[in-house]
Image: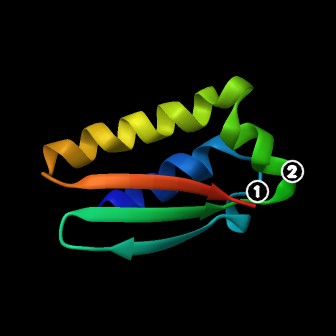
Amino acid sequence: MLYRLCLFLVRSLIDSPDAVRIDRIETERVDLFFLHVGKEDRGRILGKGGRTASALRTFLEGVAAGLDREVVVEIID
């Protein structure tokens, strides 16, 4: 569920949604998402001063807490 939500949110924020790739590692309580976007969309996903990326992480952490899980989102070049 968290994977699909993350994918939906990221694709909604950028211009080239087909270029999005999320590698994930799921453990018993933690989901690790490694987010890959195109170079032209990198600024959009980071936002000014990292605000968009921070808001994405905060939102997903809130949803994960409701599911008794943890989530880590890393943006990869």
- Rendered position, 36 above or below 68: below
Q: In this rendering, would 38 be left or right of 58?
A: right
Name the quadrant containing residue 12.
Answer: top right
Tell me the tag on residue 58.
none
Residue type of the residue flagged with mark 1: Ser
Quarter of the figure that contains the N terminus: bottom left
Few, some or many C-alpha atoms within 10 Å of disc 1 (few <14, some 14-19, many ≥20)? few
- Rendered position, 46 above or below 70: above
Quarter of the figure that contains the C terminus: bottom right
Q: Nearer the viewer, residue 54 or 21?
A: 54
Name the quadrant containing residue 53.
Answer: top right
Q: In this rendering, would 4 be left or right of 74?
A: left
Cα distance between the residues tagged 2 and 1: 9 Å
The residue singled out by tag 1 in the image is 16
Which residue is located at x 19 percent, y 64 percent?
Answer: 29
- Rendered position, 63 above or below 70: above
Q: Nearer the viewer, residue 22 or 69?
A: 69
The residue singled out by tag 2 in the image is 40
Name the quadrant containing residue 61.
Answer: top left
Which residue is located at x 32 percent, y 73 percent?
Answer: 26
Q: Give how far across and how far down residue 23 sits, in percent.
A: 53, 73
Residue type of the residue flagged with mark 2: Glu
Few, some or many C-alpha atoms within 10 Å of disc 2 (few <14, some 14-19, many ≥20)? few
Which residue is located at x 79 percent, y 48 percent?
Answer: 41
Q: Give how far across and how far down residue 60 sits, in percent.
A: 36, 44
Callout 2: SS: helix
Q: Give how far across and how far down residue 50 sits, in percent.
A: 65, 31
Q: In this rendering, would 19 be left or right of 5?
A: right
Which residue is located at x 40 percent, y 34 percent?
Answer: 58
Q: Closer to the N terminus: mark 2 or mark 1? A: 1
Q: Give how far across and how far down residue 54 sits, in percent.
A: 52, 33
